[in-house]
Amino acid sequence: MKIDILTLFPEMITPVLESSIIKRAITKGLVNINVINFRKYSKLNNNQVDDTSFGGGAGMVLMCDPIFSCIDEIRTPESKVILMTPSGKVFKEKMALDLSKEKHLIIICGHYEGVDERILSIVDYEISIGDYVLTGGELASLVLCDSIIRLIPGVISEESLDSESFSDNLLDYPVYTKPQVYRGMEVPEVLLSGDHAKIDEWRHEQRIKKTQEKRPDLLK
């Protein structure tokens, strides 16, 4: 998979790409990520990429031409263009799985008061990571990338993916490690039994219980 991230603040993004699972995926050649400062596509003398809104209003609006010009250069028939925006469809695990199967994603990080509405004409998906507002789309784009990349075959083990939260509208089961007893809190006996059938049954029951208690909306 190839991912191009269009941003005015590449320094917010590149450090995250150099650590943990994303770095390993890049090193393995499973994903290629390019961070593009679309300011360089501005045709104005001062490299301006934003301007005031027609009709008045607070804040600056990202202009069409730098973003259109950038996407014209990098887009292919296999590309899907994503705009990170509070008004987009709320990101879910199913969407992450679908996007992980794409060959090329172009992610536009909005900023300031938003983007010129005409930019939506070249966007395939408008995505939000939640009902709140960030100063820009950079952090949201990283959430998107992390969620998608880990689902690419070979990035992490299939066993880890099979029973994790949201894979089937259930939260993940409780997990424990050594020591067996800590400050009076003991590891459930069934996990020490060596009976894998009973362990699997207990874990499934715990997933349902945990979801009922913490996210009952997922069971509707």
Image (cartoon, helix red, strand yellow):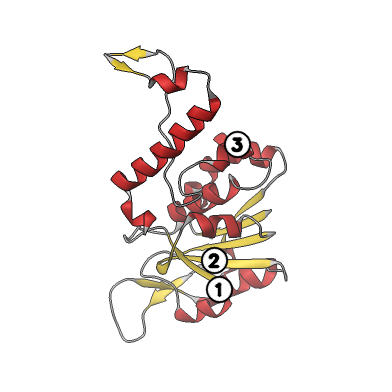
Residue to which mark 3 is pinned: 159
Give the crowd class for mark 1: few <14, some 14-19, many >=20 residues within 10 Å: some
Instruction: Report the disc number at residue 193.
Output: none
Observer-side mark, 2 or 3, equals 3
Instruction: Report the disc number at residue 123.
Output: 1
In this rendering, would 181 be left or right of 39?
left
Percent of width and height locating residue 112: 37, 66
Res 19 seen here: no
Ranked by sequence position, the earlier of labels 2 and 3 is 2
Ranked by sequence position, the earlier of labels 3 and 1 is 1
Q: Which of 140 and 99 is in front in this view?
A: 99
**Distance between mark 1 and mark 2 Cα atoms:** 6 Å
**Distance between mark 3 and mark 1 Cα atoms:** 34 Å
Asked if 36 appears above or below 152 in the picture, the reply is: below
Give the crowd class for mark 2: few <14, some 14-19, many >=20 residues within 10 Å: many
Q: What element carries label 2?
A: strand
* Residue ID at (45%, 22%): 191
* Residue ID at (48%, 75%): 63
Ranked by sequence position, the earlier of labels 1 and 2 is 2
Percent of width and height locating residue 211: 36, 46
Q: Kindly identify the amino acid type of the residue bearing the numbered disc 1.
A: Val
Q: Kindly identify the amino acid type of the residue bearing the numbered disc 2.
A: Ile
Q: How many numbered marks appear?
A: 3
Percent of width and height locating residue 109: 48, 61
CB within 8 Å, label 1 to label 2: yes
Percent of width and height locating residue 143: 47, 50
When asked about the image quadrant of residue 59, the answer is bottom left
**Distance between mark 2 and mark 3 Cα atoms:** 29 Å
Q: Which of 64 and 41 is in front in this view?
A: 64
* Residue ID at (43%, 15%): 178
In this rendering, would 148 be left or right of 51?
right
Asked if 167 appears above or below 82 in the picture, the reply is: above
